[in-house]
Image: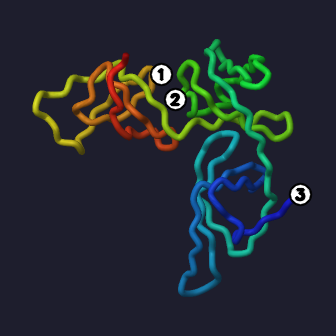
């Protein structure tokens, strides 16, 4: 068991807090006028995908957790399971949808993800930071309406609703940040 303290925090560090495994996604050392220094953090629960904000006293110790990553490719969905193919062994892996949480919103056929494991225990997946998805439904933009900060809802090919600028139309392919679920840019039309 490797222990780390708040001075070892870095983005991507996996630690055990309250018997749950979290990945540090943001941290800031803070020294208030009174009292001791603290470390403010945003951490993602590896199993559930829930992001929490937490503050720790400077020097607080944690157990570091080594997570193994294995490449998987999304194949298809069957009832309560999502089927991935292991990219090394080519065997199919059935994973319950509820174990993947919100990440299933951005799964499209053949997308490659990282399977997260501790030993042989499957924890969850890590999506690519950005995915490109086709818009399948949205209200048409009005000609000449080029104001860039006005957004409208759009449904992408995975069935997820995202906010897009008015100029985006059905058939456009948009880049989405999987960490926030937000539109990044239009990358073209479906070929």
Labels 1 & 2 near each other (Cβ < 8 A) = yes
* Distance between mark 1 and mark 2 Cα atoms: 6 Å
Above or below: residue 27 compared with residue 162: below
The colour scheme applied to this rendered structure is rainbow
Mark 3 Cα within 10 Å, few/some/many (few <14, many 20+)?
Answer: few
> Residue 15, how many percent across, how many down?
74, 55
Q: The N terminus lies in which quarter of the figure?
A: bottom right
Q: Which residue is mark 2?
A: 106
Q: Which mark is residue 99?
A: none
Above or below: residue 27 compared with residue 140: below
Q: The C terminus lies in which quarter of the figure?
A: top left
Q: Which residue is mark 1?
A: 158
| Residue situated furthest top in the rendering | 78
Question: What residue sits 64% from the left and 56% below the top?
Answer: 24
Front position in the image: 106 or 86: 86
First in sequence: mark 1 vs mark 3: 3
Element class at badge 1: loop
Question: What residue sits 68% from the left and 27% below the top?
Answer: 72
Element class at badge 3: loop
Residue 176: name its quadrant.
top left
Q: Which residue is mark 3?
A: 1
First in sequence: mark 1 vs mark 2: 2
> Residue 18, how many percent across, how many down?
76, 55
> Residue 92, how many percent across, how many down?
75, 17
Is residue 168 left or right of 124 when viewed as pictured? left
Question: What residue sits 77% from the left and 45% below the top?
Answer: 67
* Distance between mark 1 and mark 3 Cα atoms: 41 Å
Question: What residue sits 70% from the left and 31% below the top?
Answer: 71
């Amino acid at each position: 068991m490797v222990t780390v303290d708040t001075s070892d925090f870095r983005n991507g560090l996996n630690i055990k807090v309250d018997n749950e495994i979290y990945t540090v996604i943001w941290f800031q050392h803070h020294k208030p006028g009174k009292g001791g220094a603290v470390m403010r953090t945003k951490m993602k629960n590896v199993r559930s995908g829930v992001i929490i904000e937490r503050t720790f006293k400077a020097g607080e110790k944690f157990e570091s957790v080594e997570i193994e990553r294995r490449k998987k490719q999304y194949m298809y969905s069957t009832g309560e399971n999502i089927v991935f193919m292991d990219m090394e062994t080519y065997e199919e892996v059935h994973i319950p949808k509820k174990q993947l949480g919100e990440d299933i919103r951005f799964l499209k056929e053949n997308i490659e993800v990282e399977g997260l494991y501790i030993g042989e225990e499957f924890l969850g997946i890590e999506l690519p930071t950005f995915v490109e998805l086709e818009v399948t439904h949205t209200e048409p933009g009005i000609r000449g309406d080029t104001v860039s900060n006005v957004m409208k809802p759009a449904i992408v090919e995975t069935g997820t609703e995202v906010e897009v600028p008015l100029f985006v139309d059905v058939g456009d392919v948009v880049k989405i940040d999987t960490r926030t679920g937000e539109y990044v840019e239009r990358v073209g039309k479906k070929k």
